[in-house]
Image (spheres, rainbow, N blue to C red):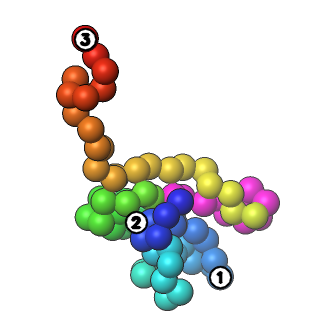
Amino acid sequence: MAEGDIHTCREGGLWKNRIEGIRRVANTAARRADAVSVGREMAQARGVGHYVHGEPRVNGDGEIVEQRSYRPISGRCGGNLGLA
């Protein structure tokens, strides 16, 4: 995980999106699906990773249950990859 990644987690009865490296919550939602959708859009717009954490009471400490990366892919196919 890197600075700027988006984390969707449940805290205090709400689903929240947090930006890694920033203390303040970016937004909240009552429903998981709504928070995940907004978190995904935020990650895509920023070109970062999106991590969805499970509910603490179900998954112990709110472990990551889903992750996606929206970072640009570096390198070219063929190019300098040592292909003949």
Question: Pointer 1 and pointer 2: residues touching (CB < 8 Å)?
Answer: no
Question: Pointer 2 and pointer 3: residues touching (CB < 8 Å)?
Answer: no
Q: Nearer the viewer, mark 2 or mark 3?
A: 3
Q: Tell me the kind of residue under disc 1.
A: Gly
Q: Which of the image's four quarters has the C terminus?
A: top left
Tell me: residue 29, above or below residue 78: below
Seen from the viewer's position, the closer of residues 67 and 33 is 67
Q: Is residue 38 visible?
A: yes
Q: Give the residue pinned by disc 3.
A: 84
- What's the residue at 75%, 64% (across, down)? 61
Q: Give the residue pinned by disc 2.
A: 39
For disc 3, the neighbor class at 10 Å (few under 14, some 14 to 19, many from 20) is few
| Disc on the earlier residue, 1 or 2 | 1
- What's the residue at 54%, 49% (across, down)? 66
Q: Tell me the kind of residue under disc 3.
A: Ala
Q: Which residues are magenta?
A: 51-60
At which x and y percent is residue 24? 49, 88
Q: Give the residue pinned by disc 1.
A: 12
Say whether residue 55 is magenta. yes
Main SS, magenta residues = loop
